Image: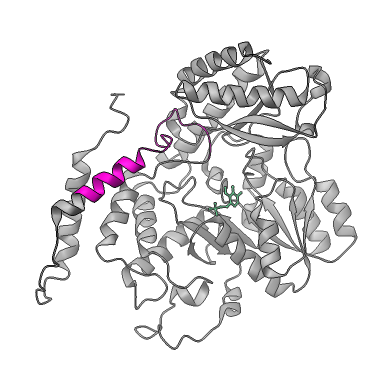
Amino acid sequence: MTERAPFAFDAAELDTLRAALGRMGEGFEALPPVAGAPSNAQAARDVLIEAATRLQDNFPYFHPLYAGQMLKPPHSVARLAYALAMWINPNNHALDGGRASSAMEKEAVAGIARMFGWETHLGHLCGGGTMANLEALWVAGRLRPGAAVLASSQAHYTHARIGAVLGLPFEEIPCDARGRLDAAALARRLGQGGVGTVVATLGTTATGSVDPLPEILSLRDRHGFRLHADAAYGGYFGLSDNLGADARGSFDRIGEADSIVVDPHKHGLQPYGCGCVLFRDPSVGSLYKHDSPYTYFSSTELHLGEISLECSRPGAAAVALWATMRLLPLERGGEFARGLSDSRAAALELHRRLAADRRFLCAFEPELDIVVWMARAPRASASSALARRVFDEAARRGLHLALVELPAGFFDLDGAGIARDRETVTCLRSVLMKPEHREWLDRIWTILDAAADAAGREKGA
Ligand SMILES: Cc1ncc(COP(=O)(O)O)c(C=O)c1O
């Protein structure tokens, strides 16, 4: 593979954009010309250069040495398609504001639904995972008014907040030692009654753990709750070919959930502002029924605003997603799926090296592509401090990791001779979500190795 500068600018991309803009313009040639907007090209250039200078103040999210939080660059076709659509700036609320981009959204969303095995569905794009979960739980609350929503203690923090926004009682169910919803604890809570909805997280934010869907589905058979799958992070992983048996078992049955959330702006190679909510039963669309005196005039076909809580939405997000899925279809064995398998392979390899190293203590094997580990020290508090030093030393050497506060129970502290003087431990965390992370693992390891040594030598270690 040829190497290129880390921030290479590919002039061919602009040629492609120019060609696409030319084609789009052909559709509007019959319009009478308008006076060009007064422009000060030099002033605009100066401002843009100033903005570019400001943007240097970022971690290098696009580079494989950024292996910290969930940040991944959009595919170049998504970037170009988004930019192309900006010349129109469609609004997918109504067909009046975004006819073509609404059609593209419907096609793209149907493609995502098919990935989950749904030939029929109701769904649309939205701002991101939080908005998508809000919508799924809003529907759940309308169908089960006043009944509790349950999610694991490792579910995304916004679920509790969404419960508060919707006025639904929200309760946390404990996790097992692998960060997955504890099915036995769930069964006990269900026995007390009053539960309307259970949220299963397929890919938790902190550790990428996958809740045990087969067990949760068995409990649904017995208790009849509504099941929402928050697969904002993990949703696409069903396409990969190297999941462990438990995660595979859950992804194979995700289509049995009543609603699913997946974020194209996480693993779907999209710019931010692209979440997706899907409902298995299209008839929930009737819950959205409203009259708009302003918008729905140009067509009797479905306007996406008729089935979404948000009003104005960027049609450009749909154009970018549609283009990406056209280039990289969501199919097992395809290029997109291979990228996910590579990320998971990178995570497994990092976990293997960490587990074999006396300076570190691993929690459990990653189920997706997120790795978490402790720095070994006599006490949990000293380990937390040491993890922060490793984090800083790694960053000083150009490797950007993340930190996460995890329950001490995720680790075998007794077995490792680490005193449990805190209930949580500050751990190192790496989200290896770029396929290139696999090839970069040796370099990542070399830096981590040096950073851990340096951190261990520092005063107080
Ligand atoms: C599992 C899960 N759900 C929901 C969210 C919230 O998504 P967003 O940040 O797009 O609102 C996240 C974000 O990381 C997540 O990991």
Q: Is residue 111 left or right of residue 130?
A: left
Can you say which quadrant of the picture contains the N terminus? top left
Can you say which quadrant of the picture contains the C terminus? top right
Give the residue displayed 35% in from the left and 55% down from the top. 320
Q: Quadrant of residue 197?
A: bottom right
Q: Nearer the viewer, residue 249 or 225?
A: 225
Q: Is residue 431 left or right of residue 137?
A: left
Q: Residue 293, relative to residue 373: is it above or below?
A: below
Q: Quadrant of residue 376?
A: top right
Residue 67 part of the magenta-drawn span: yes
Q: Residue furthest bottom?
A: 293
Q: Residue 321, relative to residue 394: is it above or below?
A: below
Q: Residue 412, relative to residue 252: is it above or below?
A: above
> Residue 175 at what x, y percent from top left?
77, 43
> Residue 339 at what x, y percent from top left?
45, 36
> Residue 438 at what x, y percent from top left?
47, 26
Q: Nearer the viewer, residue 401 or 190?
A: 401
Give the residue displayed 30% in from the left and 66% down from the top. 89
The range drawn in magenta is 46-69
Residue 375 part of the magenta-drawn span: no
Q: Nearer the viewer, residue 33 or 189?
A: 33
> Residue 351 at what x, y percent from top left?
61, 24
